Amino acid sequence: MFGDFDTGVIFDNLHFLVEGMQTTLVLTLIAIGGGLILGTLLALARLSRFRALSFCAGGYVNFFRSMPLILVIFWFYFLVPHVVGRPVGGFYSVLVAFVMFEAAYYCEIMRAGIQSVRKGQIYAGQALGLSYAQNMRYVVLPQAFRNMVPILMTQAIILFQDTSLVYVVGIKDFLVSADLVANRENRILEMFTTVALVYFVICLSGSLLVKRLQRKFAR
Amino acid sequence: MINLKKISKWYGDFQVLDDCSTQVEKGEVVVVCGPSGSGKSTLIKCVNGLEPFQQGEITVDGVSVGGKDTNLSQLRSRIGMVFQNFELFPHISVVDNIKLAQLKVLGRSDDEAHKNAMRLLDRVGLADQADKHPAQLSGGQQQRVAIARALAMDPIAMLFDEPTSALDPEMINEVLDVMVELAKDGMTMMVVTHEMGFARRVANRVIFMDEGRIEEDCTREEFFNTTRGERAQIFLSKILEH
């Protein structure tokens, strides 16, 4: 079966595949960054004393966590151009979808992180005269973030895998690029084996890093 | 300097503070003692507004703590506070702990904040530990850093909430020594503590609390030399036995 396994096809199309991987990575990194920022703001809103604010944030989180990601991707694909008033291209609509979807998950992680910071730390910041925003920025969030790094990383790995769903709106990420090559060159086995290996290596490295970080922070 | 007028506070139905009134004059050292659960920690946290209270009025340097127009952050920046569990910020170095509020609240330059931090670390005998993280220090050292951190804001008064209760016995004195020196330098201090030795040495007045009420509020001499109320006597005999 593997007798005619042709690795040449990979190297012949390497440039194309690397471009696909770039799309996947850019999407992942921006979704992590944007999701983390929006998620942290949502977490602060959820923990706010102002009922209306925490209610809205809670609604947002529960809503997006109840939606299949693929639906969200589809939905934003049609919604974003409608809101902006002009076509924006699949990539940007997908970016918005991922940031907003991931924010719901990062919100819950950061919320747990903020609650893991001792009340006395907040008192100490307040007693020094730090404002709420300063106390969050310099005292609470750095500690919350540190406590949550392993879980945030795990979520990032899931996100990296989930970006492959962008095939539904025709974006050429790593998987779609490989699929195109596979069909064009009729080398399906080679290409999908390669894709699987690449995903496996990247995600396994990520998981091992998480384990190391967990051990480091557990000390 | 610090004035408490008829402070009452409830957690739900449970009354933690019951009509507490007292004052701390400029340069005065007032020790607050009493059995656990008597409300003394809650009372001192009310002084800089860390705990809200429902009735009464607290003023510090003429500014009302619970007042609607009060800039609470600004008021707190002028009152130093030291906590039972030190509460140094674990993610930044010792010197950065002392610099943070100087930079962000007082707007001092990095250079000025650093010099001030090093001067205070030297004063509490820890200049050589400046670049370590809090977790690398012993409890006593951490608490001395916490005192330096509070002093860096040039406070008009210092609040101590059981500053030695979380310390191993051999570390208590190094912290008390720093506090005694502060007192002798004329710092206005309100100190929740069971360290009666400290009270005997530097307190101008001693307050005894029980079940949310101020039961005794008298000079050091009166407190230690004359017959106290029954509860105070039982409390004193328990902690002075050792």
Image (cartoon, coloured by chain):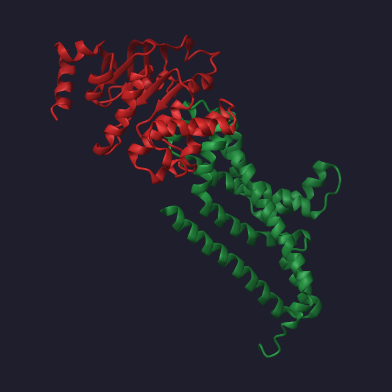
Chain colours: A green, B red
Q: Residue at x 30, y 36 (%)?
A: B166
Q: Which one is in front, A202 or B199?
A: B199
Q: Nearer the viewer, residue B238 or B222?
A: B222
Q: Position of residue A155 (x, y in %)?
A: 57, 55
Horizontal and vertical percent for residue A177? 76, 68
Residue found at the far bottom of this picture: A3
Q: How many marks?
A: 0
In this view, the residue in front, A210 or B12, is A210
Picture residue at 55% right of the left edge, 35% below the top: A136
Q: In the figure, is residue B157 to the left or right of A32? A: left
Quadrant of the rendering where the N terminus of chain A is positioned: bottom right
**Percent x, y for residue A218?**
42, 53
The residue that appears at 45% across and 42% down in the rendered structure is: B90
Nearer-the-camera pick, B106 or A108: B106
- Tell me if residue A139 comes above or below residue B58 in the rendering: below
**Quadrant of the image occupied by residue A83:** top right
Q: Quadrant of residue A86?
A: top right
As displayed, is residue B181 above or below residue A201?
Answer: above
Spot occupied by residue B133 in the image (x, y as percentages of width and height)? 45, 44
**In the shown orientation, is residue A84 left or right of residue A53?**
right
Q: Outermost residue toward the right?
A: A86
Res. A117 visible in picture:
yes
Task: Determine the image quadrant of residue A22.
Answer: bottom right
- Residue A46, can we see it? no
